[in-house]
């Protein structure tokens, strides 16, 4: 299931990036800020899992071109991660931006990354509507329906 959620997350983020790029002149900075945050958080979590220091901060603002690069890199890294069962998932030890220390299983981190993206994509959809831009449908069921048409 984690691998399926990873595929969904990558699909939804790519679809949204395309919509943001196509409508960039009509959107408020809040859409780009939230999308940058999705990309930054995903990048940071991948770095934590790999045990390396991220080069981005949580709310760092990027243009859409850099978002695209960071998204591609982090999506590729997510595809390289082993997707263990919850009972076998390794524990990652890390410190967050506030300095607090935590230990969390890889499976819980991955679920968080995928859920976090969904949460902020919904916020972006709301902002798009406020600016009279039709938001894209990034619902999980839409992803599943498209997958079944292809297969």
Image (cartoon, rainbow, N blue to C red):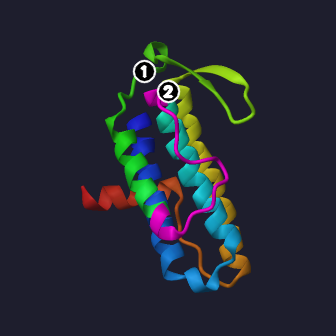
Q: Relative to 16, say whether 3 is above or below.
A: above
Mark 1, secondary structure of its residue: loop
CB within 8 Å, label 1 to label 2: yes
Q: Is residue 77 left or right of residue 119?
A: left
| Residue 89 x/y as whole percent | 46, 18
Residue 107, numbered circle? 2
Residue drawn 47% across and 31% down? 52
| Residue 72 x/y as whole percent | 38, 55
Viewer-nearest of discs 1 and 2: 2
Q: Is residue 75 left or right of residue 44?
A: left
The residue most toward the left is 151
- Range of magenta residues: 49-66
Residue drawn 62% across and 47% down? 57
Residue drawn 52% across and 31% down? 48
Q: Relative to 85, say whether 35 is above or below.
A: below
The residue most toward the top is 87
Closest to the observer, 146 or 40 = 40
Please report whichever mark, 1 or 2, sits nearer to the chain's N-terminal start.
1
Residue 85, numbered circle? 1
Closest to the observer, 128 or 137 = 128
């Amino acid at each position: 299931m984690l691998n399926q959620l990873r595929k969904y997350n990558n699909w939804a983020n790519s679809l949204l990036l395309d919509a943001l790029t196509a409508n960039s002149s009509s959107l408020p900075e809040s859409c780009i800020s939230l999308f940058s945050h999705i990309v930054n958080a995903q990048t940071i979590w991948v770095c934590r899992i790999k045990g390396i220091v991220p080069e981005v901060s949580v709310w760092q603002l990027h243009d859409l071109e850099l978002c695209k690069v960071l998204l591609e890199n982090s999506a590729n890294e997510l595809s390289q991660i082993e997707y263990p069962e919850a009972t076998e998932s390794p524990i990652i030890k890390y410190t967050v931006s506030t300095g607090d220390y935590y230990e969390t299983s890889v499976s819980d981190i991955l679920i968080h990354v995928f859920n976090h993206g969904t949460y902020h994509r919904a916020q972006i959809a709301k902002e798009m509507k406020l600016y009279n831009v039709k938001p894209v449908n990034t619902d999980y069921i839409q992803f599943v329906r498209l997958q079944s048409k292809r297969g």
